[in-house]
Image (spheres, grey):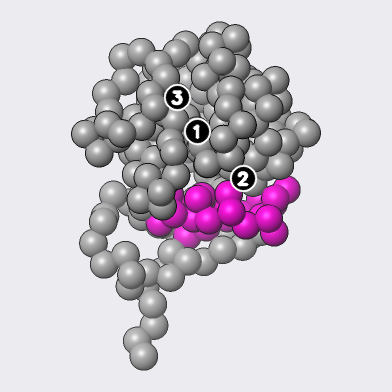
Amino acid sequence: MNSNIVAVSGASGRTGLRIAEEALARGRAVRLLVRPASKLPPSLARCDIRRLDFGRLPQLVEALRGCHSLVMATGARPSANLFGPFQVDTRTVGRQVQACQEAGVGRVVLVSSLCSGQLWHNLNLFGLILVCKRWGEEALEHSSLDWTIVRPGGLKETEANLEQQELVVSGANTQQQGVIPRRLVARYCLECLDTPDTIHQVLEITSQPRPAP
């Protein structure tokens, strides 16, 4: 196994593509797991791209063979499809967990969401999305993998002045609100891969402006 290969699922999404970009910037070999019709930016042209049906376990297992780690960024987006969160955040995550175990991938980071598991939340109007995310988290927690669950706050597209932001990191169910740029989430996920102390931890992450010196 090449211990340098990081797989990223959901790499055509706005967080996933940043995870892949940051992994490349760190000199890692990157394998992208995406659906057949997914469009990828030129910045990811150097990646090993595997197009597959996430509903087919054998395809996932084959795509993950030889990888040391996987960052899952395949979260559902709020939409009119009320079954989307269960299909993506529960079933697809669970299938990836199973595939990692069969393919010999030992280290997994899952990008989830702040307030995961909460029932009385406005976001649950979209197919109980936070409940479904928690079910996906539980599939990972109950596995034999070395896992970390990252729960970011509201995701921002901004790429400017990131050095002026500081991270607020805490344990499970301690932050109820807050935002964070997607780029900082991507960097934090990769830091978790290389930080043994984050194994078997649920970490909530937001950011705020650094105080003036």
Residue 71: percent from left, percent from top = 52, 38
Q: Secondary structure at mark 3?
A: strand
Of the pair 88 and 37, the residue shown nearer to us: 37
- Amino acid on which disc 3 is placed: Leu
Residue 56: percent from left, percent from top = 56, 9
Residue at image position (45%, 13%) is 52
Of the pair 192 and 165, the residue shown nearer to us: 192
Q: Earlier in the sequence, mark 3 or mark 2?
A: 3
Q: Which residue is mark 3?
A: 33
User: Label 2 crowding class (10 Å Cα cut-off): few <14, some 14-19, many 20+?
Assistant: many
Location of residue 171 by image quarter: bottom right
Look at the image and tell me in which quarter the N terminus lies. Answer: top right
Is label 3 in contact with label 1 (beta carbons under 8 Å)? yes
Label 1 or label 2, whichever lies nearer to me, is: 1
Q: Name the disc covering residue 7, or none.
A: 1
Q: Which residues are magenta?
A: 184-206
Q: Which residue is mark 2?
A: 149
- Amino acid on which disc 1 is placed: Ala
Residue 22 visible here: no
Q: Earlier in the sequence, mark 3 or mark 1?
A: 1
Asked if residue 192 is positioned above or below residue 71 in the image, the reply reads below
Residue 59: percent from left, percent from top = 54, 11
Location of residue 65 by image quarter: top right
Residue at image position (66%, 50%) is 202
Is residue 121 toward the left or the right of residue 196 in the image? left
Is residue 150 toward the left or the right of residue 97 in the image? left
Label 3 or label 2, whichever lies nearer to me, is: 3
Q: Is residue 199 magenta?
A: yes
* Mark 1–mark 2 distance (CA, rounded to whole Å): 16 Å
Of the pair 163 and 112, the residue shown nearer to us: 163
Asked if residue 163 is positioned above or below residue 87 in the image, the reply reads below
Q: Secondary structure at mark 2?
A: strand
